[in-house]
Image (cartoon, rainbow, N blue to C red):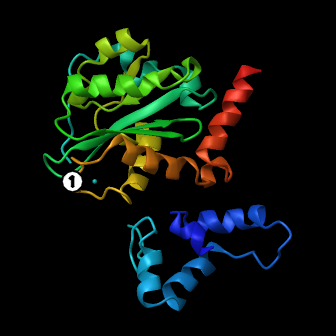
Amino acid sequence: MWGLLKDDWSPEQIAAMLPVLFPRDLRMRVSHETIYQSLFVQTQGELKRELTAHLRTGRQRRKAQTGGAKRVTLGITDDIRISARPAEAQDRAVPGHWEGDLLLGGTGKGAVITLVERSSRFVLLAPLPGRHTAEIARMKLGEMIATLPLELRKSVTWDRGSEMAQHARFRTETGMPIFFCDPQSPWQRGTNENTNGLLRQYWPKGADLRHVTDTDCDSVALKLNTRPRKTLEWQTPGQALNQRLVASAV
């Protein structure tokens, strides 16, 4: 169990998957609250510090959970507003529709491009260690899209950040449209907002991201894509994406 925690699984994920991993061992049945109690109460010293470091917050005790100037991009016409996004993207019925954003480091300390597939929560990450101008963002995002099969290149939803000022050229180069959220409406990219929250475990707010590499990004993405998710009925994003691709091919 501690091995799964060290691989950055949450106590809830561990509790849900124990019956799957140990179907015949009834001793391997435990609630996530019991795992928390064991972690925060029973463990001590170096072991406690090591294990709690793998929790989303990194805290050594539980804390009840209780919002940045908004950027503006010009040239957003009716045909690329989120209201024009295909219905299949809205209801998550078909894979290939993504939400994207920049996970920012400290001021002037780089960023990471984050893409998450809406139906499966599958994540792609790429570093922007220097300036994240519109041209650099367009080129890096194009490289990320180029790794995808054609059936996963349907659309991207973004906020109104100036890094997407070259969205028209991006669509021409990739054939993939970008739809833009309404002003001050982060919930319209809720899947990506949630994913960025998970990524803060690895890259906290204010972190220096100028030395983050493609290998670093791939490693973090692998962790997220191979962890079971409650919203996916405890499938991993990798499993969910594969299942949806198989189903759409039938």
Q: Residue at x 44, y 44 (%)?
A: 218
Q: Quadrant of residue 111?
A: top left
Q: Residue at x 21, y 28 (%)?
A: 162
Residue found at the far right of this picture: 24
**x and y percentages locating residue 16 in the rendered image:** 68, 64
Specify whether 74 is left or right of 153: left
Q: Is residue 199 visible?
A: yes
Residue at (43% x, 55% y) in the render: 198
Q: Is residue 229 left or right of residue 52?
A: right
Residue 185 appears in view: no
Other-residue count near label 1 (Cα within 10 Å), few / some / many at <14 / 14–19 / ≥20 = some
Instruction: Indicate the amino acid at tag 1.
Output: Asp
Q: Is residue 137 left or right of residue 232?
A: left
Which quarter shows the N terminus? bottom right
Along the viewing direction, whichever of 166 and 223 lies nearer the viewer: 223
Farthest residue, direction left = 108
Q: Is residue 192 above or below residue 39?
A: above
Q: Position of residue 12 (x, y in %)?
A: 60, 66
Residue drawn at (51%, 20%), measured in percent from left and top? 154
Q: Which residue is mark 1?
A: 208
Q: Quadrant of the C terminus?
A: top right
Residue 230: where, in percent of width, then height?
Answer: 62, 55
Q: Is residue 43 above or below residue 95?
A: below
Where does the image place residue 170, in percent across and percent down from the top left?
Answer: 33, 16
Compared across the picture, whether 79 is left or right of 27 comes to: left
Is residue 65 or residue 107 the one in the foreground? 107
